[in-house]
Image (cartoon, rainbow, N blue to C red):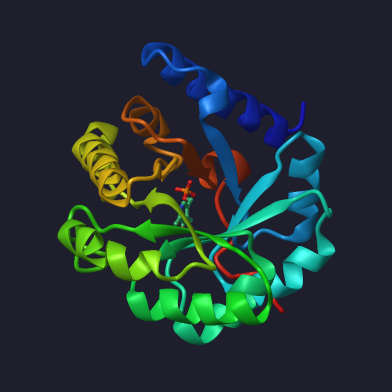
Amino acid sequence: MSELAANLAAIRGRMHEACLRSGRTIDTVELMAVSKNHPPETVAEAVGLGLTLFGENRIQEAKSKIPLSPDSARWHFIGHLQSNKARDAVALFEMIQGVDSLDLAAELQKHAVKQSRRPAILLEVNIAGEESKFGWNPQAVLDALPALRAFDQLRLSGLMTIAPYSEDPEIARPVFRQLRELRDRCADRLGSPLPILSMGMSGDLEVAIEEGSTLVRVGTALFGQRPSRPVAA
Ligand SMILES: *Cc1c(COP(=O)(O)O)cnc(C)c1O
């Protein structure tokens, strides 16, 4: 078995156990392979092992990597996106995880109309209020819902967060729980479901699943240590 195959089996096992503990079925949580800084050959190997969803956080890197990767791969943008990259993001990604301002949403709406595309979006929430992180504070998300709803070319599908880093995954549990509660309140206000909760990474995916994650974003535990530089354009 290759190292990647072994890592994938271990992650699937962790996901499965967490689902069992929380009375969920495994098909309620999707695994995203975070392929940033890894070459297209690595994506191809992962596709060969049955992975279909990939996450990238730089537009330039995605522009060069996506055309060299298998057609069956699906791509989400993760993390902070500058408004001046909105056009490329709409062209390249089926979902933009990490919409953190109304200005960015407006740019995405504009380019989605121009390109006749209907990208899904997730709102990034900075639950813990960390200075170093992008994302809305929880009250701001609730306040922004009417304005966001007017961007009718964007499919508002849920929320995402990056928990504070810690050796102890239990530290992240209240953050994940608050994201789920906020999602429920947002869905109530909108009067429509927000099915996706993107939370949990290599170190804390079990806790995230126990708290309701529907999409875990895993890089290091799958591909090993990331190369320190992005793949050159
Ligand atoms: C890099 C990244 C990940 C993956 O992190 P790992 O700890 O390597 O699993 C997940 N989400 C976002 C937004 C990232 O930028």
Q: Quadrant of residue 100?
A: bottom left
Hey, which residue is sitting farthest bottom in the picture? 84
User: Can residue 134 be seen?
Assistant: no
Q: Position of residue 5 (x, y in %)?
A: 71, 31
Q: Quadrant of residue 47?
A: top right
Quadrant position of the N terminus in the picture: top right
User: Can residue 19 be seen?
Assistant: yes
Image position of 209 (left or right of 118): left
Taking the spot 53% from the left edge, 82% from the top edge, the residue there is 110
Q: Position of residue 79 (x, y in %)?
A: 44, 64
Image position of 158 (left or right of 59): left
Image position of 159 (left or right of 11): left
Q: Position of residue 75 (x, y in %)?
A: 65, 56
Q: Quadrant of residue 6?
A: top right
Taking the spot 44% from the left edge, 12% from the top edge, the residue there is 20
Tell how many labels.
0
Taking the spot 29% from the left edge, 57% from the top edge, the residue there is 125
Query: Which of 56 and 213 lies nearest the eye of the viewer?
Result: 213
Taking the spot 48% from the left edge, 81% from the top edge, the residue there is 107
Q: Does 132 appear above or below 53? A: below
Q: Does 70 appear above or below 85? A: above
Query: Which of 117 and 47 lies nearest the eye of the viewer?
Result: 117
Quadrant position of the C terminus in the picture: bottom right
Q: Position of residue 72 (x, y in %)?
A: 80, 49
Query: Which of 126 and 61 lies nearest the eye of the viewer?
Result: 126
Q: Does 61 appear above or below 208? A: below
